[in-house]
Image: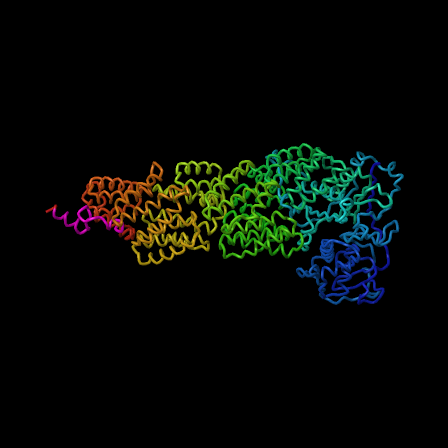
Amino acid sequence: MTPAIIIDTTSTDSTGPINAPAESPWPPHTRRLQVDDLTIDLWYRQLASPGQTVELPQRVFDLLQLFLAQPHTLHTRAALLERVWPGVVVEDANLSQSIWMLRKALGEPRRHWVRTLAKSGYVFEPPAPILPLAVDDMGAAGIPGGASTGIADEPARDAAGLDTEQADAANVGVDAQAEAGVDVPECPAIDPAAASAATPSATALRSRPDRASGQRRGLLIVAMALSALALGIASLFFAAKPPTSPPAPASPIAVAMIDVGNHNNDEARWPATLLRAWLGWKLDALPEVVVLTEAHLAADTAALSPNIVLLSSGQVTNAPDQRFVRARFDGVDGSRQIELRGSTAQVPQLVDELSRQVLAELVPARRDELWPALSVDAGSARDYALAYEAYSQRDMSASATGLASVLAQAPRFGLAHLQLAMSLARLGQANPALAHMQHARELLSPLSADVAWVMDAMQLSIDPQRRAETATAFSDLAAQYPQNLSYRLEQSRYQLRAGDPEAALATLSRADWETQPTGVRIQWLVLLAEIEMARINPDAVRLHATEAERLAHAAGQGWEHERATALLLKAQSDAYQWGELADRSQFDEAARLFTEAGADIDALHAKVTAELSLPPSGPSAQLDSLLAQTRAGGYRSMEIQLLRRVAFQHYNAGDLVEYRKRLEQALACATHAGDAVAQLSLDVSLLNEDLLAGRFSSAEERIRRIRKGHLKGDLATWLDQFEAFTLNINGDYAGALQALDQTAQRLAREGRAPLPAVTTARLACVRADSLLAQGKLPQARQQLADCADTTQPFVRDQAEGLGTAIDLLAGDTASAVPRLRARNALIQAMPDAPDRWMVALQNGYQLARAGQLDDAERLYSTTRASLQKSGYDWLLADAEIGLAEVATARGQWPQARRLADSARRHLPDDGIWLQSQRLGQIATLAALADGQRDRAHSLFTATHARAHALGDVVAQMELHSLMAAAGFPDDPLLADCDANARAAQIAATGMRGATVDWLARALPQGNGRQTMAAVASDRRGATE
């Protein structure tokens, strides 16, 4: 049996009053009320104001009558549901939708009359008394049938004479029969016996001319789709130039589809779900259309003016073998309802045809658009509806499983291939996602050029290797369709995913987001917070996430996921900045909201993220559960992130075996997933390993390789810092300063936002080290001021160490020693892990130079013991050099030689200037102690020449102080460093503390140890 078409465009009005609430304060039989400049017609459910008359659906009007009867009173949501839908089980969204429609009908000047009290209900607050109008006062306002811009111009009684309750069944507030999925006839019915002969075939239906329809009224810019999936899903066939397309409207056409069927009856509602998915895909693929959710409608009551399409389906009354699929919406000629009927087997055909007709009404310019056929049988479509619900609720694992099962039955169902590709991409399973996307592109054909262009961008986005190309695709779409801000958001999102947060930030600066509806601003603020998180800008993360959470909270139901995401970002930022002092309840609240939104794996992820921000406290059942779920569900991206975080939790705890194991697992997952950005990020972590282990050749090669990947964001500044470190330890201080400025200079050239304050502070600390080595003490002090200007604990600790170094070089030992002892106490409280070891080595170095040899020895010894099995040979060598220096200062020459020899065995063959010059000083003094003056002289001159060649002023000055102790000042090779030159250097740099007097104090008299006065006396005697 071919489907019958029932199209209802009736605009006939019935007469007679609607029953008012029993407690109505106005007289019986009152027909009209006056409130300020608004006239309410109680008989015709109309609101008349200057310039327009609006007719309300029955349930919306019932809601208004309650408000009119009890103004300035709090009406709880529960009470309103009970009174407007008595005896009917309805969802809370019905009330939100009715409130939205009432505010729209009241008009912008009066929408504030209905005030929302968060988590309580509503108060009706008209600015004037509610007055009944006498018949003589009605005037022209009492004539029905005037100009109407009704939300849903549904008559109280239709042409077939159906009663009000039957007509009301199709309104937003559905009655019990409609909730049960049973058809309540609202239009002249076609005799089922004659339907087959009277109805054209499905093929004829598709070619049937659509009813003429004028242009819709202009719409305001509205929010993009809520689902993160709809935020760009992709194509390998991206067109470089925009194809020819219909002229875009000044503002996007906003459409909200709402299923008003029985949500507890899957058998009744699956055709409506299929329609919502199929029509939704078509609408979402049109550049000039933005698809909204009920959450957007609840949040944006003031700004939005969308086309609301009410979808329902069920069994036809008195014809159990027949089903109906219905769409109801506002048309240019008034309220429209299109209903198709047919057998269960014909439901996919009904849905396909109904989607064509509704789309032609909503977007008249697309009336003759090319679309593929809906290729799925009824049985598979029923299963698909369940999978689609999981998909629309962002349960990617469940949707992937369900969609795969559907495709096993219906392999030519293109939309299922598309959504499975999107689900798999979200799970990080790129290769199967690409395969299903390719099937989708082949099956979802034909398409118009601009729709294919959107699909191209979607297809690109699922390939982790082509995120930058995806961003370019959305950039071109945004340029072609500037009124559709979702493309600009997607461009920014994929720039972020491509590892370029600065470009993502710049993209968002191209629109005036503050003037957009709430839904858009929530998405914008969450994305801003994510971008600033990637830039390591905790203050900005906190600012944007806090505002996003506030807006999402005020928006109410449907925004729990966005609110949870904002809270989680804020919690992570606070934990990063303040450690254990941060408010950890934010993690718990984020997890609760994720659970409320049905995102159980996200809830568990929030709990595990809270765990990972603290030192490990033994095996974690939650972590093991989440890792198991990510693997079982195929959440590759989440698994990579988790493994990396787990790795660094173990790193911070000193469990290096587990750290390296997890890091290797993360890299293997990233490689398998083809995630180039994750691989680069992990490569930077491995670079840190190279440096700590002293594999400097490997580190330099890795830096070159990472540079070719065009690393961006905060990781780029870490790469700059690591590169500067490799140059610093080899004495290339000018090169190190240039390396530190690479990212900042690139951002300036590209017109990007400058580096965040915390990053600028961190780099200032490193920059000061290079400046000190060059003898530029004033410039180093300025960098110290920048370094200390942060709330980030680890950067402030760097600033403390830098300040102590400056005190020592300036000769202010009295100020340095208390700072060193205070820092020593803090070190003892740190976990026995790499961060502690590096701080301890720095403090030991400074304690020794301040003459605190016992404290330095204890610090070096405990650190050396921890490093023995760490695999960090370079750090181990540094600890042994420090102990050798302490032994040298004490005159323990055999021990000094033994420790120095052990340190050399742990260093690279080609040597590192930072360590080799310290070892050279130890060897020179040991040779002098043994009376090997020629050997000492040879070692000294070699180190001295290298210090001058590199421009290491601190090393030069330390060696100059050794000249007096060793008795080398008469050497003609050192003529440029005579006493006058040395004095001038001290005066120019202000570095009176740059000496090795502390190291040479045990050098025996007669073995070369002389005072500067004795050396000067000898020189005068020789001259005479």
Q: Is residue 944 left or right of residue 580?
A: left
How many numbered dots are placed on residues in this image?
A: 0
- Spot occupied by residue 636 in the image (x, y as percentages of width and height): 58, 40
Residue furthest to the top in view is 442
Q: Is residue 615 left or right of residue 75?
A: left
Residue furthest to the left in view is 1024
Q: Residue at x 79, y 43 (%)?
A: 325
Q: Is 766 covered by the magenta stretch?
A: no
For this rendering, which residue is in front, 44 or 114?
114
Q: Is 1013 covered by the magenta stretch?
A: yes
For this rendering, which residue is in front, 61 or 242?
61
Location of residue 441 with respect to 111 vertically, above or below = above
- Tell me, yes or no, if residue 512 can be seen here: no
Image quadrant in which the N terminus is located? top right
- Tell me, yes or no, if residue 420 can be seen here: yes
Q: Is residue 157 left or right of residue 247?
A: right
For this rendering, which residue is in front, 882 or 854?
854
- Spot occupied by residue 377 in the image (x, y as percentages of width and height): 76, 36
- Spot occupied by residue 937 in the image (x, y as percentages of width and height): 22, 41
- Spot occupied by residue 13 in the image (x, y as percentages of width and height): 84, 53
Q: Is residue 358 left or right of residue 674?
A: right
State how the image is colored. rainbow
For this rendering, which residue is in front, 116 or 730?
730
Location of residue 76 with respect to 945 vertically, above or below = below
Range of the magenta residues? Answer: 997-1021
